[in-house]
Image (cartoon, rainbow, N blue to C red):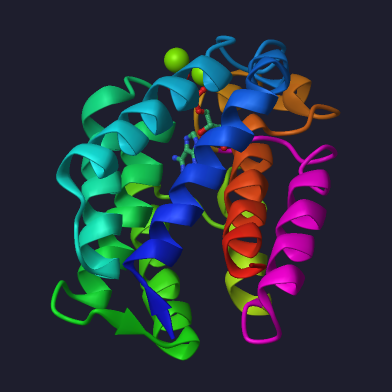
Amino acid sequence: MLDADFFRRWMTAAAAAVDREAERLTALDSPIGDADHGSNLQRGFAAVVAALEKEAPATPGAVLQLAGRQLISTVGGASGPLYGTLLRRTGKTLGTDAAEVGEERLREALRAGVAAVATLGGAAPGDKTMLDALVPAVDALGESFAAAADAAERGAEATTPLRARKGRASYLGERSVGHRDPGATSAALLVAALAEAADV
Ligand code: ADP
Ligand code: MG
Ligand code: MG
């Protein structure tokens, strides 16, 4: 069973990964965006970690809802509301009463979270967005957390030849081809952080 500590570890590992990879994320956002993806997420996840320390939410659902709210309120770019919605909807689906949740329950909640991202952004897999990593990750989660992380990484890598149909990169049309999507790359970091939290 997965308790509030597990979800806190996930968010802390995500914040550390975003810190470590901030320059790379911003560099990826330079040719097909506005070169702020790394700094956006650094600011957002730093706020997530600070809020979790201050408020110490007691259940998995409460941890994720607080994290989602922080991302929405601190990140100005598209990725803030999108990742915020992912975590908030996942947390809402888990509810705030259960002190522990099973992996099956988490899988279903993440599926709902990813669906909420697709609804909010109007994107689908193949559009060269974070969904290209998130959707295969949720599909592989039934196997293991590590399989989900691998699927997310492969999905992010596979965005390079795609033409962007959503977000800033879509303004470039054909010129977005040949560049890896920054949001799919950070989504793979988020899923890797989940596998890290599980691997203790
Ligand atoms: P902004 O583009 O506002 O500067 P960021 O640079 O933080 O925001 O995030 C850009 C990333 O957000 C993109 O690489 C893409 O993966 C993701 N993204 C943008 N628009 C959408 C959308 N409509 N649906 C899903 N993901 C999106
Ligand atoms: Mg940007
Ligand atoms: Mg921006």
Q: Residue at x 68, y 39 (%)?
A: 185
Is residue 128 depicted above or below 133 in this figure? above
Q: Residue at x 37, y 75 (%)?
A: 109
Magenta range is 141-165
Asked if residue 152 is among those painted magenta in the image, a careful observer would answer yes
Q: How many marks?
A: 0
Is residue 179 depicted above or below 65 in this figure? above
Q: Report the quarter where the C terminus lies.
A: bottom right
Q: Residue at x 31, y 28 (%)?
A: 47
Asked if residue 86 is among those painted magenta in the image, a careful observer would answer no
In the rendered image, residue 130, in percent from the top left (x then y), is placed at 57, 46
Residue 33, quarter of the rendered image = top right
In the rendered image, residue 168, in percent from the top left (x then y), is placed at 52, 22
Residue 118, quarter of the rendered image = bottom left
Q: Residue at x 58, y 58 (%)?
A: 134
Q: Is residue 78 in view?
A: no
Which is nearer the eye, 96 or 133? 96
Q: Report the quarter where the N terminus lies.
A: bottom left
Residue 19, quarter of the rendered image = top right
- For ligand 3, give the image quadrant: top left
Q: Taking 58 as reference, is 18 left or right?
A: right
Which is nearer the eye, 72 or 55? 55
Q: Taking 140 as reference, is 51 left or right?
A: left
In the rendered image, residue 8, in percent from the top left (x then y), is placed at 39, 54
Q: Is residue 160 in view?
A: yes
Is residue 146 depicted above or below 180 in this figure? below
Is residue 168 depicted above or below 16 in this figure? above
Q: Taking 57 as reference, is 68 left or right?
A: right
In the rendered image, residue 65, in percent from the top left (x then y), is placed at 23, 55
